[in-house]
Image (spheres, rainbow, N blue to C red):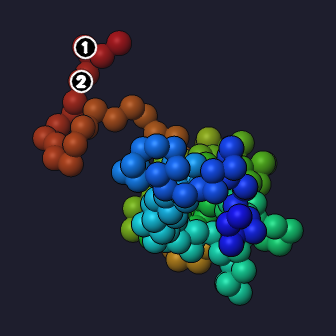
């Protein structure tokens, strides 16, 4: 009988002695072969353990307790699904895109910024260096918007943030412009050939 209680009894009652099978003791047989295979598996497992330990360190909690892989538990976790708005907000903040997104919000949500009534009679045209150019539907609306410029600036600052729009340039509808680019030649432009 073997001293190890976990080992099964030797097959055929040979007692597990080497050489009992008539091999002359050259190769292990029976339980000796099983012990050699178990020892080789243990050595392989020990050799692979540091790699497994490194990967399991990512799955342990702050308290050192092991956490099941892929399971975040009942509390909030950074791996939980996040709302798109919060993910985009963090991305905008990390990249320093606050000002361009605020400027885009002036154009994208113009009706919300100034109100539906005002937005139906004017539209933003250009925003450069904090100066917003607004084109009104008529000269009467342009005059009305010039009177409301202070209130419009307060409403814009409340919606998109302070310092995004600092000044308003309001003008009425304009005739088609024949100038293109920053430089142009003075003159009357097309006369009888137009139309």
Q: Nearer the viewer, residue 111 or 168?
A: 111
Residue 183, position as x, y percentages in the image: 16, 47
Residue 195 located left or right of residue 22: left
Q: Is residue 6 visible?
A: yes
Relative to 194, is 186 on the left or the right? left
Name which residue lies at 40% across and 62% down: 128
Name the residue: 72% across, 80% down. 65
- Total labels: the figure holds 2
Name the quarter where the N terminus is drawn.
bottom right
Crowding at mark 2 (Cα within 10 Å: few <14, some 14-19, many 20+): few
187 up-or-down from 172: above or below:
above
Percent across and percent down for residue 28 are 46, 52
Q: Nearer the viewer, residue 69 or 132?
A: 69
Residue at point 55%, 58% (across, down) = 17
Is disc 2 placed on a helix, strand or loop? loop
Q: Which residue is mark 1?
A: 193
Q: Which residue is mark 2?
A: 190
Is the C-beta separation of discs 2 and 1 under 8 Å? yes
Horizontal side, residue 37 vs residue 117: left or right: left
Looking at this view, is 85 or 66 the one in front? 66
Q: Position of residue 158 (x, y in %)?
A: 70, 72
- Is residue 152 in view from this perspective? no
Residue appearing at x 21%, y 33% in the figure: 188
162 in relation to 139, above or below: below
CA gap, disc 2 to disc 1?
6 Å
Instruction: Point out residue 111 in the picture as x, y percentages from the top left corner.
Output: 71, 50
Q: Secondary structure at mark 1?
A: loop
- Quadrant for the C terminus, please: top left
Circle 1 Cα neighbour tier, 10 Å, few/some/many (<14 / 14–19 / ≥20):
few
Q: Which mark is residue 40?
A: none
């Amino acid at each position: 009988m073997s001293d190890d209680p976990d080992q099964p009894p030797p097959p055929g009652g040979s007692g597990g002695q080497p050489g009992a099978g008539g091999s002359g003791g050259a190769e292990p047989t029976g339980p000796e072969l099983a012990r050699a295979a178990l020892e080789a598996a243990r050595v392989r497992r020990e050799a692979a353990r540091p790699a497994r330990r490194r990967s399991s360190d990512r799955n342990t909690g702050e308290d050192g307790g092991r956490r099941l892989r892929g399971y975040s538990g009942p509390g909030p976790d950074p791996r939980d699904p996040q709302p798109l708005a919060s993910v985009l907000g963090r991305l905008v903040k990390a990249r320093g895109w606050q000002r361009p997104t605020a400027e885009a919000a002036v154009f994208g949500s113009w009706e919300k910024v100034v109100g539906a009534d005002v937005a139906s009679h004017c539209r933003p045209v250009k925003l450069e260096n904090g100066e917003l150019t607004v084109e009104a539907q008529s000269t009467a609306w342009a005059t009305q918007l010039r009177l409301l410029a202070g209130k419009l600036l307060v409403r814009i600052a409340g919606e998109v943030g302070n310092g995004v729009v600092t000044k308003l340039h309001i003008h009425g509808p304009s005739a088609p412009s024949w100038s293109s680019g920053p430089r142009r030649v003075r003159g009357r432009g097309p006369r009888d050939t137009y139309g």
